[in-house]
Image (cartoon, helix red, strand yellow):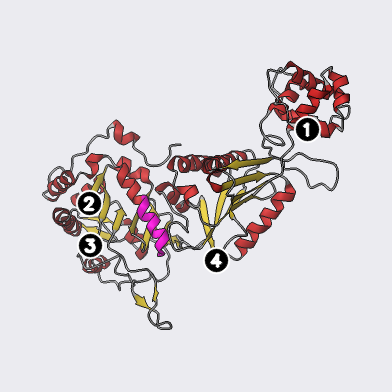
Amino acid sequence: MKTDQKKNRFAIAMDALDTTAEDLSRACSVDSSLITKWRRGDRKLTSRSKTLRAAAGGMLVLDAEGVLKEYYTPYRISGKGDADAMLAYLLDAELPGLTPQAVPPKRQLKGHYVAQYRVYLGEREFRRATLEMMDYLLTLPPGREVVILCYGRYDLMTKNLPFVFQFILKLRKALKRNTRLLLVNRKGYSVIDTAAFTNTWLTAHLKGYIRSRYYEGGLPGDLRYAASIRGYWAARVEEDAEVEDNLYTEMNTDPRYTRKIEQMCDEYIAKSKPASQYQFLENPSGGGENEKLWKHGPLPAWGKKDAAQEGTRTGAPAPAGNFYAICRVPGFGVLTQKEFTEILSGDTPPDMPDYLVGSGTFASGPHRIILCREDIQEGLQKERRMHEPLSALLHRRAFVTRELLAKQLARLIEAMNTRDDFEVALMPKTAFQKLQTEMICFENSVSAAWLQDMRESVFADDEATSGSFYGSVGYTWDKLMAGWKRKRTVISQLRKWLNGKELDKQEEDSAVVKNWDVLPRE
């Protein structure tokens, strides 16, 4: 994509004054040929130039109607005069307008107004533009919604973890002002084609900071992203073979531009699936002894054939056996059907697919399970311990007895002893709570995640999203302290607890534990 050469700020000011180089020369005693070079962009504007300072003062002399005031007012510094502010405006690198304002330009049919236009080239500049968008958002009145229309290239938003952390930190500030972010995503079937998650990104979704919708098809031309803050700002990201990384990003506050992007976003929102694309499980206000409930529809089973279309499958793709989990105590993915029946205590069992409760034999493929140290100790000390996710799913208090928990832990020890690809980590509670989420995921198949306070949960049964969850747990595993996941240490500790030893031992959290965090800090 090519754009016309934009006027520099010296030319914009001259045009606003409707004056000539000769008129300005007479007002400031600067040679008219130099003024012409500045105006055409043939001579660079520099703060070291005394003649440029004189020209800025000459512009103010010619500005009898005060048309330049809206240009230089944002550059006023206490103790400095109009000439200094005008010079600062001329030297600012932005083209062609003002710094972000809380009041958008009014719709006009005549006269003039100043709008902001910025161009960013390459992937690094795309991320810079995204962070500057968040900074601009913080200057606006509270309660704004940001709509981001996406078509592929989700890696631009998720593969750079330092950027993700910066984005989430800025989003947290915006959320305090009642900001919401809506992602309108292209429906896809691979990690490349759909929104991927880090643990941070998933937590933001679960907390409702970010919501998602999905549409079928593609965007116009080479467009990859379009974004809108209604009435204030808009942006577009395009493929462009002539620039760095083939990526061109443009941001604008011109209302004639922003309205077009708003209309495009509205069109795709209207034809997209609602924000339950990730099947967020509703948490209605409960009653009785458990107010934290998950309301859900039938959970799909794998390998179920569609009677209407012979040979096709509905529900989740069959698992490869690759399983990751982050949970306080063992549960989904470890619990057997017989154990689940025991927990039900005679109640009629709900329709639970075999990937949540199985036969007791772990499938082949890598297994990584992160458990909370203090919660395991508590479960082995008490006669029974409430299991939070099962309670939310069953809509009543569900308890795991000490004997049942011990049986599950023994099964984990046996798997660790006999398989190189089966690993368990014991994380201190202080560190575990910083994760904020718990989850299970079968790579490219099925995932369930929930906030530790059970306030919100999500179930996903598409290959791409589950693969992304799998990757986010892998990232967390790699960040764990070596001692928390060292197999021999974990097996030894679990055996001691199963033998009733060290169950009362509370290790004091070290500075490393207190400072450990895979999420960005406040």
Relative to 193, is 97 on the left or the right? right
| Mark 4 lies on residue | 216
Residue 516: name its quadrant: top left
The mark closer to the camera, 4 or 2, is: 4
Q: CA distance from mark 4 to mark 2?
A: 39 Å
Q: Which residues are magenta?
A: 460-472
Residue 423's disc is: 2
Position of residue 261 measured from the top left corner of the image (x, y, whole percent)? 67, 54
The mark closer to the camera, 2 or 1, is: 1
Position of residue 403 measured from the top left corner of the image (x, y, whole percent)? 16, 58
Q: Amino acid at mark 2?
A: Glu
The mark closer to the camera, 3 or 1, is: 1
| Mark 3 lies on residue | 364
- Residue under the point 38% across and 55% down: 469
Q: Amino acid at mark 3?
A: Ser
Position of residue 190 measured from the top left corner of the image (x, y, whole percent)? 43, 61
